[in-house]
Structure formats: structure tokens, C-alpha cells
Image (cartoon, rainbow, N blue to C red):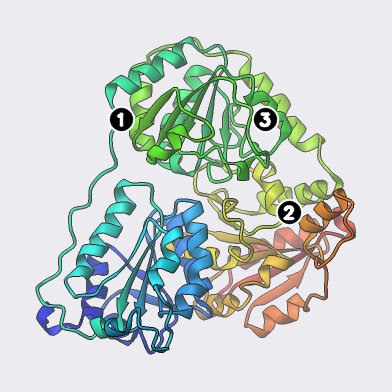
Amino acid sequence: MTTNSELTVGEATIELLEQYGVDTLFGIPGVHTLEFCRGLNRSSIRHVQTRNEQGAGFMADGYARASGKPGVALVISGPGVTNALTAIGQAYADSIPLLMLSSDAASYTLGKGWGCLHEVPGLTDTTAPLTAFSATAMHPEEVPELIARAFSVFSSERPRPVHIAIPIDVLEMPAGDEWQAIELPQRPAPTRKKIERACNLLRNAKQPMICVGGGAWLASDAITELAERLGAPVIGSTAGKGIIGDTHPLSLSAGRVRGEVQEYLAKADVVLAVGTELSEVDSFVKTLEINGKIIRIDLDPRKMSDLYPAEVAIIGGAKTSTEAIVRELGEVEARSETVAEVAEIRAAFRSDISDSQARHTKTLDVLRAALPPETVVMGDICQLVYTGCFAFDVDRPRLWHYPAGYCTLGCALPDAIGAKLALPDTPVVAFAGDGGFMFTVQELVTAVELKLALPLILWNNNGLKQIEDGMLERGITPVGVSGPNPDFIALAQSCGCHALRIDSAETLTNAVSEAFRTDRPTLIEVNEWDPWLN
């Protein structure tokens, strides 16, 4: 057996990642990552070759979203890091555990401005604003310490991305003593006093409501039980969609963007906010009107005193904290009016919509019927997905992914690839618009190479329609929002995909079903202006 003293730092780093449970890396090899590649050759970790490092970052993000495990991107110094940084920003905004591991220029050149290959002055300073921490390992013994710190963040704190850079000369050094993964810390548990205070507020509430975000996904069962016991409606963020099933009579889905839901929330006298920032990206209003007392459950202490200060601030894991509230609360009289109020609001989701949203809804209804209930949807930044937040039902957490926080175009396809690799036996589908799809279209080749049965629903409205709509609403003559598109069918076929255009609901149903039975991705183009949608 090879000892660590016989391994380079690059080889030992890959071996250590394997100890932490990493089974997949996403990236593009380069001359500055050759020692990592030497380690991959003696490891069981799968390396997925992407076509751009931004794709690598998004795939790692999608892997983490779908699995709950940290995703890992392995990139070169300089352009590899900066190409991936958009995806790191998305993971930061949505609290996704993602490790970006990179090389850096030789340690003895750093800060000297010699113009070395891939040189970025202060590489980890570049990534620091979008990570829980970023650090450079200047000596071999610093590598296991930094990796342990990264996985400790993922397991016990708000799980934001981490960047660790290792200079190329350090990568080639002997690793030295054996490296071992540490026992990871757990998330903090709530204090009994805080749980009692929360329960007192909830027992005395006349109109309690529950707001959930992506940080509450492990607490789905406890939140559902608590909502039923209180007769409290549950309002999800885009990341909180499905934490209580969308078809549950107390669910308002990810409807915070709707005016009806915002007005309803203003009537609450107590609001329990679990794992959510209550961010403007979920409502598109600068500040929600919340008149009731707020109980906040979050891993991030900074959320307790932001725009929505907490009456009761519970710092702890969502599952542990909500289960403690359920145990302490006891029997209460459930508010009886809530189910009818929620049903009336949900009806407005269908009746009070624009012509464009009606076309989205028709498409989404066909897709919902055609897709298996357990399908994971990876959404891009497009109007079909905006409407889907309140018009496409999912009944479990982590089946709907729309990264509204950073809101960067191009995420759906690579996110879906990462999700499918994380959950190979689960159906995964991507929803993207024609504009966003072109940001990462090259990753079709990656999906073909991996032989992924992955449907991509391409919503083609011939431009950046959301921006165009905004210009028109403000009396601005549209600029920069339209232009020629490629022949998407020919483009996808040239990458080795199946591809077809949809001309009826029946064609769409059949196309989706067939896409799950093939050995490659299928691009399914739906044009918003086609007659069958009118």
C-alpha cells in the first residue's frame, strides 16, 4: 500500500476527498492540475469533463442540490476559477455546499507580478466575497486542515461554497504524514427556552402563518405536522417549494411573488420563518409587509436582525428545531378558516394571470401530467419557470430548483446534468428559455458523452421577453432583447442529441415519455407563439 509520504500533495488531496465521501468531480484538466489528475488515476472518484468551467461549477451545484451532499469542482488557476465564479455566486446565494478546488501559480511567485501563466493577483481574494471562506495552502500540511474546515462548514453552518487553492509547486511536494478525514461537527441545537417562547407565541396566535425556504428541506414532515396542528398556511420561497406538498390544502406553494399571498401574509399575527431569508427575490417587492411577530429558525445568526428582526431567534437546524416545537406545543385548536382561504388564493393563481402566463400554465399542466411525480426539475431563469413557481405542483422538497437568488442565465442544463449524476435512478428534467440555454449550450456534449436520458424543455419566445416586457411597461423602446436564434433542432442534433419541435399537447406528452427511455439527452422545443397554446 502506498503511504502518504510517497504521494504528492495533489494525489493525497484526491485521496482525502474520497475519505469525505466525494465520488464525483466536475472540471477541465489543465497544465496546473496534473498532480490532481495523477491522484484521480488511482482513485474511484469519477471525473466529469465539462466544456467550460462555468458548466463545472453549475454541475457541482446541481449535484449538491439534488443529493444534499457537497458538490466539487476541480479547476485550473486563473481563468478556470473566474469562469466558474458565476456558478459559485449562485451557490452562495442559495446556500449550497460546494467546494471549488483549484491550482494557483507557484507559491514563490505569488504577489510578485511576474506575469506567470494563469496569474491572478490574490486569486482567493477574487473568490472571497462569494464563499464562506477562500484560502491558499502554502504548505502541504495546510491542505488537510483547510479541507476539514470546508466540510465542517458544510455539515454545521450555513452551507455556502468554499474555495481552496493549492499552488502548483505545493501540489508536487510530498504530502508527508498520513491524512485522515475528521469527525464532522453537527449543527447547533436550539435552547429549550427559545422553543418554549416560540410555542407560547404560536399557542396564542389568532392567525399564524409559516414561511419556509431551502434551509428547511430536512424538516418537511415536522413542518407539515405543525401546519396541520395550527391550521396555518405554508408559504414557500422558490427553494422551499414542496417542503409541504403543493397539493396539501394548507400550501400556498412558492407563491410569495403573488400579490394575493403578500396581502394574506400581512394579516398574520405570528409568522414562523424556517430556513428562509424572506428575500425580495421571492416576492419582487423591496420589503414584505409583515405585521405579526416573527419567530425565525436559521443557521445564520445574521438573519435574526436584518429587514425582518426576530421576536424569537432560534439558531439551529430546521429539522431539530421544528421537531422540538412540535413536541413542546402540545394540542392546540387549529384555525378552521385557513383551508378555504388558501383554496381561494390558489384559485386566483389560475384565473388572474396574463395571456403569456396562460400559455405557460397550459404547457406546465401537460408536463406535470407527463412527468413522473418524483421528477427533479432544474429551472433556468425564464418565464416558464417563473410561472411554474406557483402553477407546477411538486409534493416533496428538492424536486423544484429555480435559483432565484443570483438569478443567472444558463444554469438549468448543467445543473440537471449534475443532478442526474447524483441521482441516476431518478428522472431529471431541465426547463430553459432560448436566451439562457445559449449561455451553456456546449454542455449538451457533456450530457451526450455521459449517455444521460435527460429531457430539456426549451421555451422559445424569441428573445429576452421578461426584459422586453419590463421595458415596455416603463415606456422604453426595446433594445438588446431580440435577435436571430440558431436552428435549435439542428444545433442539438449536431451535438448528438435527439431533438424535436412540439405542435400539440399530445406530441409534448409523448416526447417527454420517450426522452426518459433513450440513451442521450432530448431537446424538446416549445414555441410560445404556436397555435396549440392559444
Amino acid at dot 3 = Gln
Q: Quadrant of residue 196?
A: top left
Separation (CA) of disc 1 from disc 3: 29 Å
Across and down, in percent, residue 415 comes to 53, 63
Residue 262 is labelled as: 3
Which residue is at a point 52% across and 31% down the rendered structure image?
A: 308
Which residue is at a point 28% across and 34% down the rendered structure image?
A: 189
Q: Quadrant of residue 326?
A: top left
Q: Residue furthest front?
A: 112
The residue singled out by tag 1 in the image is 190
Dot 3 alpha-carbon crowd within 10 angstroms: few under 14, some 14 to 19, many 20 or more: some
Does residue 371 appear in this view? yes
Which residue is at a point 16% across and 78% down the rendered structure image?
A: 175
Instruction: Give the structural element (helix, strand or loop) at label 2.
Output: helix
Left or right of 331 in this view: 166? left
How many marks on residues? 3
Left or right of 12 in this view: 283? right
The residue singled out by tag 2 in the image is 383
